[in-house]
Image: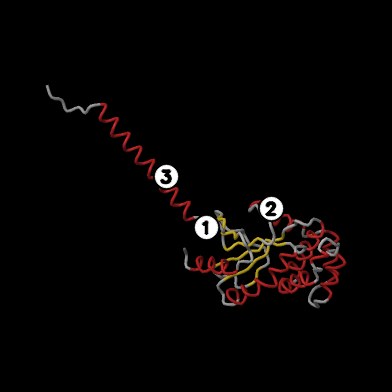
Amino acid sequence: MKTNSKSPVKILFVLTIVIIGILVAIVLLNNAKSSNQDPEVTVFEEQPPIEGQPLFGEESAPVTVVEFGDFKCPACKSWGETVFPQLINDYVDTGKVKFSYINVLFHGEESQTGALAAEAVLKQSPENYWTFHKAIFDKQPPMESHDDLWLTNEKVLEIASAIPEIDVKQLQDSLENQTEMNEVSKDNQLVNDYNIELTPTIMVNDIMLEDPFDYEKIKSLIEQELEGK
């Protein structure tokens, strides 16, 4: 007698073939994704928030570049003298990029002093923040004197006194009372959230570069983000 029921063995065989096919497809897809990963970058789920952070450029610029930096860091000084001017000329001044800076405290008390001073100036005179920012780095001693104590309250007050628009007495009070410690703590939390291990660390939107001095890579990432890829 004939029956319309399919053999359980045949059904099991077909199911096995289907499952194997799905597994092979998953492996191939994962391999394809791996092959497309760029070892020079790390991609995060979102870019660092820049609300309340110092901003250079037009707020409406479509791409954000963030530096995680330390006023005590020689590499940050070098980045600011070499890569930063190119970035400003090519992308910030043209309205394509806005730049922001997040404080890192890898060098202890001196890093904190610089960060507190910068945050205080940002609060009282935001239009003079970047002048003050650059002036601190300009006063950084040569590499061979990197470990010398120099980033003190007295030094940042001296630097500020050369910028007429900054109220030095107000800055002094802020430093003595550490009034901007909450802002510095927010930055420190971002350093932890994004697992920052080196300064400077540069991010283009949600993409972190392996080499912050590779300006061609920075440019390619900016262009990629501008194109919406």
The vertical placement of 154 against 31, above or below, is below
User: Which secondary structure, mark 3?
Assistant: helix
Structure colour scheme: secondary structure
Residue closer to the observer: 130 or 29: 29
Q: 64 left or right of 27?
A: right
Q: Residue 153's spot in the image, x, y percent?
A: 85, 64
x 58%, y 63%: residue: 204
Distance between mark 3 and mark 1 Cα atoms: 19 Å
Q: How many marks?
A: 3
Is tag 2's residue or tag 1's residue first in the polypeptide sequence?
1
Marking on residue 189: 2
Q: Residue 7's spot in the image, x, y percent?
A: 23, 27
Q: Amino acid at mark 3?
A: Val
Q: Residue furthest top?
A: 1
Marking on residue 27: 3
Q: Residues within 10 Å of mark 1 (few under 14, many from 20)?
A: few
User: Which secondary structure, mark 1?
Assistant: loop
Q: Are marks 2 and 1 in contact (CB under 8 Å)?
A: no
Is tag 2's residue or tag 3's residue first in the polypeptide sequence?
3
Query: In which quarter of the view is residue 160 placed?
Result: bottom right
Q: Residue 218's spot in the image, x, y percent?
A: 58, 67
The vertical placement of 132 against 115, above or below, is below
Q: Amino acid at mark 2?
A: Gln
x 71%, y 65%: residue: 76
x 15%, y 25%: residue: 3
Q: Amino acid at mark 1?
A: Asp
The vertical placement of 45 against 7, above or below, is below
2 vs 1, front mark: 1
Q: Which residue is mark 1?
A: 38
Distance between mark 2 and mark 1 Cα atoms: 27 Å
x 53%, y 67%: residue: 220
